[in-house]
């Protein structure tokens, strides 16, 4: 797995080379939490977000949004690498195709977790929790990020034209995030949107993170939500892997 | 002047991906975000309130971000080609301000049709108020963008515009009414150009009373930013020439 480690290291370094872009996005999410959610908290219907305040609800959901952007963008990197021929260079190295794919997915997930850490610190201040709960939710987020890397790779390899690729990515990102429970609870949605939200993996990742973060031995463990996140990660990862080996020159993986 | 404005307008709307991105941002914001938040909070007519806020955000995204075109031209040296054209420096300067404003106006025209279906216009005066506000705010934001692009060093343009943009958006009434804000924030929001634009447009839709303060804020900032942008761009052209 040495090859995967090399690819992973490169992807994480490349991502944080654009430190300004990553930092700016994080600042925007922090401001959304401490200003937007803080102000709206005072006007939210009582009980609409369960035992949490809207500020706490939003702070935990914004971590999922941040994870989404950072990991899903691995697809954009794969697209660029294919367009400028870097992928051919990677293929010429003594690294197997499955190692390249594993490296990319793990790299995408790791950078997503690193990006979300400052937001997690903010959330941990706003929502009292335990170290074990934090570790568990980070594990769930890592699995979710793996699935998003797979989804990003599927989107990137499904389209050849750059304009279409950008539009597809924008559409998937906006539709998945804005029609999920990452930023507002399902009870606030109209019925048609509730049905849509229940089909989105982002919804289950958001449920899982919120429930795991406030988990206590007396509460019910969100096993079903976590299982759905894991199923999504497995299916998206496998589909991404299959499409990668099918699309990239050289035939099936290994 | 019109040649420059037309050239920039065509260039902007020829980029299908950028325009569709902006449009999708608004549509998903309206049908997912505004619908859900409208049912979540106890603010009356919050859905309509947010739709208008998103429209003003759309103007900001087009008119203010027009500065990217200008700053890129300065960085890459294309400005020299523009100077070689048989267009006066004054005409070139005014043309740039108008181009940015026109981009915002045309773009919001598309959103406006969508907003009318969702909110419904009540009076002719209301429609005229909205139209006049869109023109004024587009001009203000285009001028502000140009002022930033011409008054700062190239390496400072992006950070400055981002800081300015975030301050304008989060300390305004785009997303939340002023009465929900903490006291010091209310004061800042009163003098915020985006708040003034959004409040006047809401008044046009009949969602709130029209306020003279908003009108004065918009006119004052228009005057300040207009002067700064024209002076800055003209000075830059003179130095290059």
Image: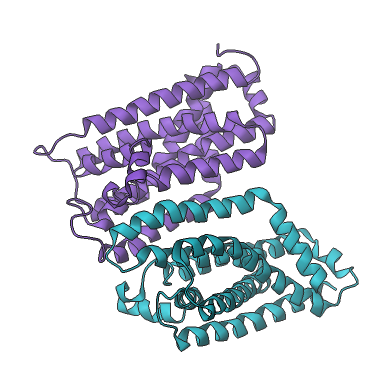
Chain colours: A purple, B cyan
Front residue of this view, candidates B16 and A225 = B16
Tell me: A18 left or right of B120: right
Q: Residue at image x 57%, y 55%? A: B22
Residue B110 image position (x, y, % from top left): 59, 60
Residue B240 image position (x, y, % from top left): 82, 71
Tell me: B76 left or right of A27: right
Residue B4 image position (x, y, % from top left): 79, 68
Q: Residue at image x 29%, y 62%? A: B41
Displayed quadrant of residue B176: bottom left
Displayed quadrant of residue A201: top left
Above-or-below relation of B82 to A84: below
Front residue of this view, candidates A178 and A124 = A178
Q: Residue at image x 60%, y 65%? A: B109
Residue A183 image position (x, y, % from top left): 35, 51
Displayed quadrant of residue A64: top left
Q: Is residue B159 visible?
A: no
């Amino acid at each position: 797995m040495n090859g995967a480690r090399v690819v992973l290291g490169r992807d994480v370094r490349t991502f944080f080379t654009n430190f300004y872009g990553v930092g700016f996005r994080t600042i925007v999410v922090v401001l959304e939490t401490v200003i937007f959610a803080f102000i709206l908290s005072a006007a939210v219907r009582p009980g609409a977000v369960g035992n949490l305040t809207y500020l706490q609800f939003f702070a935990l959901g914004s971590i999922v949004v941040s994870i989404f952007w950072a990991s899903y963008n691995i697809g954009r990197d794969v697209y660029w690498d294919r367009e400028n021929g870097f992928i051919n260079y990677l293929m010429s190295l003594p690294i197997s195709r499955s190692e390249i794919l594993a490296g990319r997915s793990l790299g995408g997930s790791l950078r997503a977790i690193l990006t979300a850490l400052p937001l997690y610190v903010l959330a941990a201040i706003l929502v009292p929790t335990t170290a074990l709960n934090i570790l568990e939710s980070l594990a769930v987020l890592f699995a979710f990020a793996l699935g998003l890397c797979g989804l990003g790779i599927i989107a990137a390899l499904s389209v050849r034209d750059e304009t279409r690729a950008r539009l597809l990515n924008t559409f998937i990102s906006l539709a998945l995030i804005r029609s999920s429970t990452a930023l507002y609870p399902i009870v606030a949605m109209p019925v048609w949107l509730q049905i849509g939200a229940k089909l989105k993996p982002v919804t289950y990742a958001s449920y899982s993170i919120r429930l795991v973060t406030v988990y206590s031995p007396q509460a019910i463990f969100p096993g079903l939500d976590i299982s759905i996140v894991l199923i999504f990660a497995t299916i998206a990862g496998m589909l991404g892997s299959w499409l990668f080996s099918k699309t990239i020159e050289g035939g099936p993986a290994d | 002047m019109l040649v420059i404005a037309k050239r920039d307008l065509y260039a902007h709307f020829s980029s299908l991906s950028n325009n569709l991105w902006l449009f999708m941002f608004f549509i998903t914001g309206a049908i997912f975000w505004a619908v859900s938040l409208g049912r979540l909070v106890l603010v009356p007519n919050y859905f309509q309130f947010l739709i208008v806020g998103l429209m003003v955000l759309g103007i900001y995204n087009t008119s203010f971000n027009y500065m990217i075109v200008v700053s890129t031209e300065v960085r890459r040296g294309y400005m020299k080609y523009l100077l070689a054209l048989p267009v006066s420096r004054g005409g070139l300067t005014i043309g740039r301000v108008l181009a940015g404003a026109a981009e915002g106006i045309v773009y919001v025209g598309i959103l406006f049709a969508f907003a009318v279906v969702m909110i419904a216009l009540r009076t002719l005066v209301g429609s005229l108020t909205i139209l006049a506000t869109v023109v004024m705010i587009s001009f203000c934001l285009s001028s502000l963008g140009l002022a930033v692009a011409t008054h700062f060093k190239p390496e400072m343009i992006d950070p400055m515009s981002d800081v300015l943009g975030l301050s304008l958006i989060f300390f305004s009434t785009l997303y939340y009414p002023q009465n929900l804000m903490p006291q010091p924030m209310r004061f800042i929001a009163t003098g915020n150009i985006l708040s003034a634009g959004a409040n006047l447009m809401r008044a046009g839709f009949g969602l709130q009373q029209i306020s003279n303060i908003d009108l004065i804020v918009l006119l004052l900032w228009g005057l300040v930013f207009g002067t700064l942008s024209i002076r800055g761009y003209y000075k830059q052209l003179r130095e290059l020439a």
